[in-house]
Image (cartoon, grey):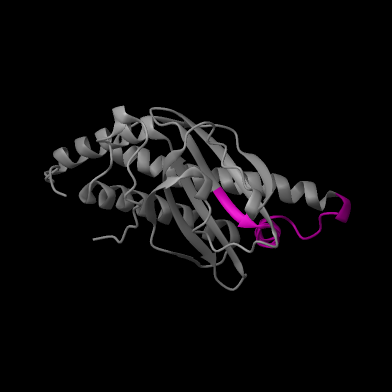
């Protein structure tokens, strides 16, 4: 059974009081994300020609203001976030989150070494957006295929923050389902997080897709 971490906080929207995922559903979602994250790790290893290790994914029901609190990021450093809005069956965001100097190292591993200094920053930004696009599509595309739902990932955008001022872009939603895992590029001192978070309405849909998947797989959906 995959280890998960879940905040047992009641949702504020009274119509959604019963949408919390049970233990079996959380394990299944974590397993799906684990498979997707391994696809991302393989893609990152291919891009950088370095081995990539992957932490066990975690699923949490959270207050969106604490979305990044579990990530071991250096408060004193700028944070780089490659963000892909999700739409269609599931709405939310998928992100690749790194501290600034790790983001620079990651981009430098994937761009030619002879780029002129005056073009380096632009080249790094373009490469980071492309890396985020590849990794996030590999991860969440795998999850969507496994659970049989449609999702559109928009064009990636880069965002720069201090950790204590990071904006998750969730709008008025106060609670969300967040999934995260840490990928580490061995021998390159680069660590980044894949984070996916969705609001209440999408949690309802995810619960439905999980139950359909488990019924088809012969898993007891009433287990807790």
Q: How many labels does the image show?
A: 0
Image location of residue 171, percent across then percent down: 54, 32
Q: Which residue is more in the foreground, 11 or 191? A: 11
Q: Which residue is more in the foreground, 6 or 126? A: 6
Quadrant (top left/top right/bottom left/bottom right) for the N terminus: bottom left
Q: Is residue 99 above or below residue 135?
A: below
Residue span colored magenta: 96-118
Q: Which residue is drawn at 63% across and 53% down?
A: 164
Q: Which residue is drawn at 38% across and 28% down?
A: 89
196 sits to left or right of 99: left
Q: Residue at x 55, y 71 (%)?
A: 186
Image location of residue 208, percent across then percent down: 25, 33
Q: Does the magenta stretch include residue 151?
A: no
The residue at the far bottom in this view is 187
Image location of residue 11, percent across then percent down: 35, 38
92 sits to left or right of 211: right
Q: Is residue 69 above or below residue 147?
A: below
Q: Residue at x 61, y 42 (%)?
A: 167
Q: Is residue 111 magenta?
A: yes
Image location of residue 83, percent across then percent down: 58, 41
Q: Is residue 11 above or below residue 135?
A: above
């Amino acid at each position: 059974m995959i280890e998960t971490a879940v905040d047992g906080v009641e949702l504020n929207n009274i119509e959604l009081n019963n949408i919390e995922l049970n233990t079996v559903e959380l394990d299944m979602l974590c397993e799906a994300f684990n498979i997707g994250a391994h696809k991302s790790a393989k893609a990152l290893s291919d891009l950088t020609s370095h081995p990539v290790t992957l932490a066990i994914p975690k699923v949490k029901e959270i207050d969106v203001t604490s979305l990044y609190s579990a990530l071991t990021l250096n408060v004193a450093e700028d944070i780089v976030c490659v963000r892909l809005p999700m739409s269609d069956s599931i709405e939310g965001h998928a992100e690749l989150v790194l501290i600034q100097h790790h983001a620079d190292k990651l981009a430098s591993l994937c761009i030619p070494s002879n780029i002129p200094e005056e073009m380096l920053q632009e080249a790094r930004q373009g490469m980071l957006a492309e890396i985020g696009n590849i990794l996030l599509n590999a991860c969440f595309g795998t999850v969507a295929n496994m659970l049989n739902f449609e999702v559109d990932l928009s064009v990636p955008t880069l965002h720069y923050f201090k950790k204590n001022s990071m904006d998750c872009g969730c709008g008025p939603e106060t609670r969300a389902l967040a999934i995260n895992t840490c990928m580490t590029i061995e021998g390159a001192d680069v660590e980044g997080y894949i984070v996916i978070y969705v609001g209440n309405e999408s949690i309802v849909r995810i619960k439905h897709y999980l139950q359909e998947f488990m019924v088809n797989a012969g898993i007891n959906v009433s287990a807790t």
